[in-house]
């Protein structure tokens, strides 16, 4: 830059930098990273590119990322649309590593672009059918946590496997995402209802509670809480709205089955209301079920294979802590769920340095098995089967409110330790970043915009 006037070549170079910066943010957003992580990674990449933080302005929305670089004489802005939202924990982890590696190893822009393209184009860690099997067994694990026998576990797994594949095929055919969820929930619940007539299980109705729980939007919900606490209000509210739409679509599919197929079957309503919330199996049985559910959701979230055993242990810790606080200490399911997720998140604050992955990669799949499926279905059934009897509305709202509070506490338990730890170590990371940038300057590899 001469006399503070940018040449055409310098303008083209800056546009390329902004393009790569936006592509980085897009990959993170479409892989379900929380907003704070997206912002931190983008600022780190900008530092690698020589864009000063005081000249960089980033605005992150769920569907759009905007970047502006400006000084006293110039202002350049670019926008990036984010459309294909999913969950890919491997991508989140790899971009975080790439942002540091680019600084430490003096990447050129072309080298960074090459590595970013590899991350964007790499195949998922598991094939479609392996993921569907993982989703199936995850729901089977849920079913076992709700108190079913192993035959019902198998039925729930099969129903969820088929429902998961139905949703994938609907999306492939171009059907709306929320309608695909409703169809998948409908098919899974129909199959689970049909399995109750086989007479092979002593707990025939339990698969109805778990067969569609692969749809539960745990990652968007936890990201919503994380964003709201971090004051990213617009993105957080958008994530909450998306979560509500997913839950609504799932509820519609299940409710439709109940009104069409089960409206005359009063046995189901009684069975669900009589289900015990007190564990009647040994702790090791719940540990196995929690591990299966956590590993299954890890496959859905595309977590690296090397971390599956870590997440399984996290699921065991979360569920056993929840049960101990809930039943042994008598503090109830809300506090129990909060403590289960809090303990896992607290351990993950240290474990991320052992396994070199972001916190959410370890915590979110671990706490998903604590979703209160029994209470959710009790509330849904109570609303569907209202007949004007005194106490029906109170019962429905009690179960609904309790399940909502449990899910909120799970989200808070994951978010709070991570946020405080992130703020605690932010200074050390900033110091390390400044040292690495100074080393690049000394090597003559750093040119500031």
Image (tube, grey):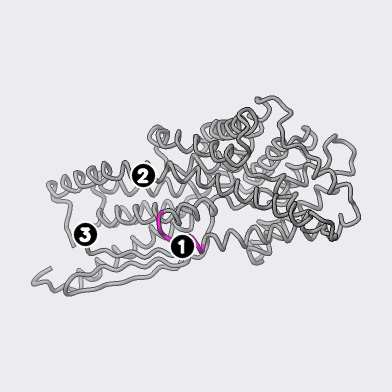
The furthest residue to the left: 3
* Image vertical order of residue 74 relative to residue 354, above or below: below
Q: Please give the name of the residue rendered at 29% of the width and 48% of the height, measured from the top-left corner.
A: 102
Q: CA distance from mark 1 to mark 2?
A: 20 Å
Residue 252 painted magenta? no
* Image vertical order of residue 165 relative to residue 15, above or below: above
Q: Main secondary structure of the magenta part?
A: helix
Place residue 371 in its image quadrant: top right
Q: What residue does disc 3 label?
A: 52
Q: CA distance from mark 3 to mark 1?
A: 25 Å
CB under 8 Å between callouts 3 and 1? no
Front: mark 3 or 2 = 2
**Magenta span of residues:** 230-238
Place residue 348 in its image quadrant: top left
Secondary structure of the residue carrying numbered label 1: helix
Q: Is residue 445 left or right of residue 45?
A: left
Image x and y of residue 125, in percent:
53, 44
Earlier in the chain: of badge 3 and badge 2, it is: 3
- Label for residue 422? 2
Image x and y of residue 225, in percent:
49, 53
Q: CA distance from mark 3 to mark 2?
A: 22 Å
Q: Please give the name of the residue rendered at 13% of the width and 74% of the height, measured from the top-left corner.
A: 5
Q: Is residue 299 left or right of residue 387?
A: left
Q: Residues within 10 Å of mark 3 (few under 14, many from 20)?
A: some
Earlier in the chain: of badge 3 and badge 1, it is: 3
Question: Is residue 134 visible in the rendered structure shown here?
Answer: yes
Q: What residue does disc 1 label?
A: 235
Image x and y of residue 316, in percent:
58, 31
Count up the numbered dots: 3
Residue placed most toward the observer, 187 or 49: 187
Secondary structure of the residue carrying numbered label 3: loop
Place residue 423 in its image quadrant: top left
């Amino acid at each position: 830059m001469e006399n503070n006037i940018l040449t055409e070549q310098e303008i083209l170079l800056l546009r390329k930098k902004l393009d790569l910066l936006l592509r980085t943010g897009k990959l993170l957003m479409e892989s379900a990273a929380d907003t704070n992580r997206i912002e931190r990674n983008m600022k780190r990449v900008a530092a690698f590119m020589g864009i000063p933080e005081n000249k960089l302005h980033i605005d992150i929305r769920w569907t759009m990322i905007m970047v502006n670089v400006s000084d006293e004489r110039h202002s350049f802005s670019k926008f990036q649309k984010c459309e294909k939202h999913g969950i890919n924990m491997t991508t989140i982890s790899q971009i975080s590593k790439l942002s540091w590696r680019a600084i430490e190893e003096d990447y050129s822009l072309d080298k960074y672009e090459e590595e970013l393209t590899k991350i964007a184009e790499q195949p998922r860690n598991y094939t479609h059918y392996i993921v569907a099997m993982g989703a199936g067994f995850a729901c089977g694990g849920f079913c076992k946590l709700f108190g079913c026998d192993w035959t019902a576990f198998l039925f729930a797994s099969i129903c969820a496997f088929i429902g998961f594949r139905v949703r994938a095929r609907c999306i492939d055919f171009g059907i709306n995402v929320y309608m695909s969820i409703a169809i998948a929930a409908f098919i899974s619940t129909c199959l689970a209802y049909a399995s109750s007539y086989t007479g092979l299980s002593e707990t025939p109705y339990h698969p109805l509670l778990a067969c569609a729980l692969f749809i539960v939007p745990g990652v968007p919900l936890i990201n919503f809480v994380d964003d709201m606490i971090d004051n990213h209000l617009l993105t957080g509210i958008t994530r909450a709205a998306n979560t509500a739409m997913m839950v609504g679509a799932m509820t519609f599919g299940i409710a439709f089955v109940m009104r069409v197929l089960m409206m005359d079957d009063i046995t189901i309503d009684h069975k669900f209301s009589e289900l015990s919330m007190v564990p009647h199996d040994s702790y090791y049985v719940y540990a196995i079920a929690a591990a299966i559910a956590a590993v299954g959701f890890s496959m859905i979230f595309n977590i690296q294979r090397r971390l599956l055993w870590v997440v399984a242990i996290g699921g065991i810790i979360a569920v056993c802590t929840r049960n101990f606080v809930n039943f042994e200490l008598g503090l109830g399911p809300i506090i129990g769920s909060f403590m289960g997720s809090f303990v896992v998140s607290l351990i993950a604050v240290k474990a991320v340095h052992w396994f070199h992955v972001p916190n959410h990669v370890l915590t979110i799949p671990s706490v998903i098995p604590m979703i209160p499926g029994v209470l959710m279905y009790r509330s849904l059934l109570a609303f569907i089967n209202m007949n004007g009897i005194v106490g029906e509305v109170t019962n429905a709202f009690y179960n609904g409110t309790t399940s909502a509070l449990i899910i909120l506490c799970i989200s808070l338990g994951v978010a709070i330790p991570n946020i405080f730890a992130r703020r605690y170590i932010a200074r050390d990371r900033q110091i390390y970043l400044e040292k690495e940038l100074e080393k690049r300057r000394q090597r003559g590899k750093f040119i500031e915009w």
